Amino acid sequence: MTTITLDKKKETKKVPVKGMMDNVMEQFNSASDQINLHPNIRKILSITNNEILVNFPVKMDNGDVEVFTGYRVQHNNALGPYKGGLRYHPTVDIDAARALAMWMTWKTSLAGLPYGGAKGGIKIDPSKYSQSELERITRRFAFALADNIGPEHDIPAPDVNTNSQTMAWIADTYMSMRTPAERTANQHVVTGKPDGAGGLEGRDRATGYGVYLSIKLWYEKNNKSLDGKKFIVQGFGNVGYWASHFLEKDGAIMVGVEDASGSIFNQKGIKVDNLFKYSGINNGSIIDFPGAEPVEKEKFFGLECDICIPAALGNQITVENAPIIKAKLIAEGANGPTNVEGEKILLERGINIIPDILCNSGGVIGSYFEWLQNRNGELWQLDEVMEKLYKKLKESFNKVHEYSKRESMDMRTAAYCIAIKRIEKAYIQRGIFP
């Protein structure tokens, strides 16, 4: 555990800052207490099944060799193959991978999918490498992981700073290591692939659509409309863009956006597609967008709005900024964006939270559809995909909302209770070997 120093009224005091693993364990233990989880099953779910760390060399464009560190943590597979993304980011480490893998276990269980949870990635800043270098890094990482992933064992997907191209490289590398007869049968070793390489139409928007639909369903449950509601979004990548796109189509107004380059605000509204086009020609940055004013990073979460969508990294809403949040609804597009201390403040202030394992589950549901499509040799059309996605997401939302109301608890605890109960049932029915 690290600490930060705060200067308040000229006094200095140490405030503990918890990592993502601390947060996920507190959330898990709180829900486990609520459902009186069997102590033996609690022991099993408190630890990961497998943790893979690989160091691998890659030749750079200039001929130099760099050594990279990659991770894959497989938390639990009681319900089916491990499932979870691979991210490329300087913050990737074993602690983060463990926490993210556990969240994936709860997410796939809550969605009713035949999957367990895994996560991983490479500790790297991809912006510092060329496209050809990233391809070699990815293929070498896939080669190192090859014995630990597979279409019926562990199925990676895109995450932070990875995309359909990354998945295509991994799939191609993995299949090239198989016999000719095995190659077609292993196409679904990863999901989130490009359309032409076995990908699913609509997979690009599935996570963002799920965030939007969760917000829409929450408003419907409270007999309100999205029309005219103002929202801010942290992270304007794939998830943030598509969530904003669908919200705007339903009458909501985007007033604030933050990405790694900075924060912008316009109380009258920022057109989603205009900002998306601008960032596309501005090296992916929103900074200096002509339709908005810059905002200090420390003030972003305190902007006037109805809805706040953290869709970037974990531990963004904390004890430091939770008191200034003005939104009445937090929709977690990222994994673990709100830490435990920050959440307590939000709940005490009457601010509602749609938890990550529900709110951003559209991505893994879309991945399941792609996996099925490849497995069965089918091709699904976009309208069919979106219809199936809507049905699955609405079913999950209704379960969590009803459980939350029935048991008088917040939605995160309700979501955890439902997810953990499903895994507990599997262990009770199957027994524990030997």
Image (cartoon, rainbow, N blue to C red):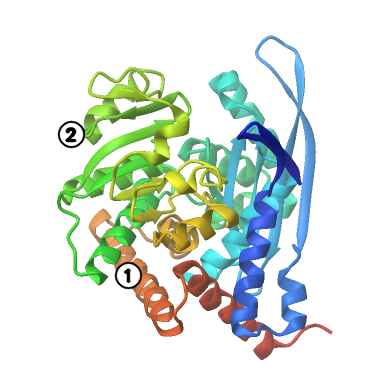
Task: Give me the disc on residue 394.
Answer: 1
**CA separation in Å, label 2 and label 1:** 31 Å
Q: Quadrant of the C terminus?
A: bottom right
Task: Give me the disc on residue 268.
Answer: 2
Question: Is residue 398 left or right of 129 when viewed as pictured?
Answer: left
Residue contact between numbered discs 2 and 1, judged by CB atoms under 8 Å:
no
- Amino acid type of the residue that numbered disc 1 sits on in the rendered structure: Lys
**Residue at x 22%, y 23% (from the top left corner):** 291
Question: Is residue 174 left or right of 269 when viewed as pictured?
Answer: right
In x, y percent, where is residue 365? 43, 62
**Residue at x 49%, y 67% (from the top left corner):** 412
**Residue at x 35%, y 47% (from the top left corner):** 326
Q: Secondary structure at mark 2?
A: loop
Q: Earlier in the sequence, mark 2 or mark 1?
A: 2
Question: Is residue 137 left or right of 49 when viewed as pictured?
Answer: left
Residues packed near mark 1 inside 10 Å, few (<14), some (14 to 19) or many (20 plus)? some
In x, y percent, where is residue 353? 42, 60
Residues packed near mark 2 inside 10 Å, few (<14), some (14 to 19) or many (20 plus)? few
Front position in the image: 138 or 33: 33
Kindly indicate the quadrant of the structure image that contains residue 341. bottom right
**Of labels 2 and 1, the one closer to you:** 2
Kindly indicate the quadrant of the structure image that contains residue 64. top right
